[in-house]
Amino acid sequence: MTLFITFEGPDGSGKTTQARRLAEYLQARGLPILLTREPGGTEISEQIRQVILSTRNQAMRNEAEVLLFSAARAQIVAELIRPALAAGKIVVCDRYSDSTLAYQGYGLGLDLDALRAITQFATGGLVPDLTFYIDVPAEVGLTRRQRGKTNRLDQKDVEYHTRVRNGYLELAKAEPRRWVVIDGTASVEEVQGQIRARMMSELGGRGL
């Protein structure tokens, strides 16, 4: 039985580290794993990622941003994610379509119904089985991000990132069976422990 797991969270939440650690943990248990990320994961999607995140592209329209993210998503779903699921792998993806609703919907104020329609077209309706949301206040996430290399989205103000976080919490509240909300201000080990416990419960429930 296959499983599609996604990680979501504000910038600086630590979700990338947590996704990698979970994938390594599951792989060590002998499970077939694909770890990938959005936007990216394929040659075409990685090229699109560079355009979206480049700090040189400050003039990018919000609508263009949505369509670029969706183009990268369409490519990775068709080229990587669906084939991996068909091959019986557990897919762990660092960000997926919920990011579009949080960042471009709640963050930028674009129409959520339109974004859902675009996402449906791009993904063919592929929805994660389980989504781990690593929650941190916007100020915490931005402080963490500023310690390293920042991208175009990192440069937006704290009010934008607060809207994104609140959007994520709304999405999680609307689908409590799919979303697992975890306090990202805890230590890396504590966060990973909670993720592994929930993951093993999910696997046990599915007979994996």
Image (cartoon, rainbow, N blue to C red):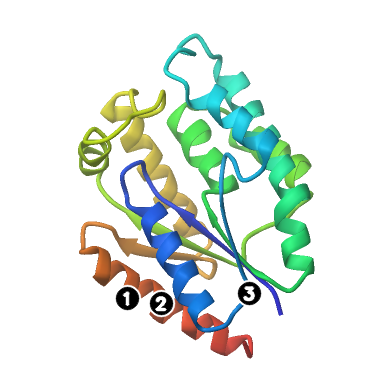
Q: Amino acid at mark 3?
A: Pro
The residues tagged by marks 2 and 1 sit, at their Cα atoms, a distance apart of: 5 Å
The residues tagged by marks 3 and 2 sit, at their Cα atoms, a distance apart of: 16 Å
Q: Nearer the viewer, mark 3 or mark 1?
A: 3
At which x and y percent is residue 129?
A: 61, 67
- Disc 2 crowd rating (10 Å Cα; few below 14, some 14-19, many 20+) is some
Q: Is residue 111 above or below residue 140?
A: above
Please report the residue visible at 55 percent of the width from the left and 20 percent of the height from the top: 62
Name the disc covering residue 196, or none.
Answer: 2
Please report the residue visible at 53 percent of the width from the left and 14 percent of the height from the top: 60
Residue on which disc 1 sits: 193
Name the disc covering residue 32, or none.
Answer: 3
Tell me the SS state at disc 2: helix
Residue positioned most to the top: 59
Tell me the SS state at disc 1: helix
At which x and y percent is residue 133?
A: 41, 58
On the rendered image, what quadrant is the N terminus found in?
bottom right
Disc 2 + disc 1, Cβ < 8 Å: yes
Please report the residue visible at 43 percent of the width from the left and 78 percent of the height from the top: 198
Q: Is residue 22 left or right of residue 149?
A: right
Mark positioned earlier in the residue sequence (3 or 2): 3
Depth order, front residue of 146/167? 146
Please report the residue visible at 41 percent of the width from the left and 27 percent of the height from the top: 153
Tell me the SS state at disc 3: loop
Q: Amino acid at mark 2?
A: Arg
Q: Amino acid at mark 1?
A: Gly
Q: Is residue 80 left or right of residue 93?
A: right
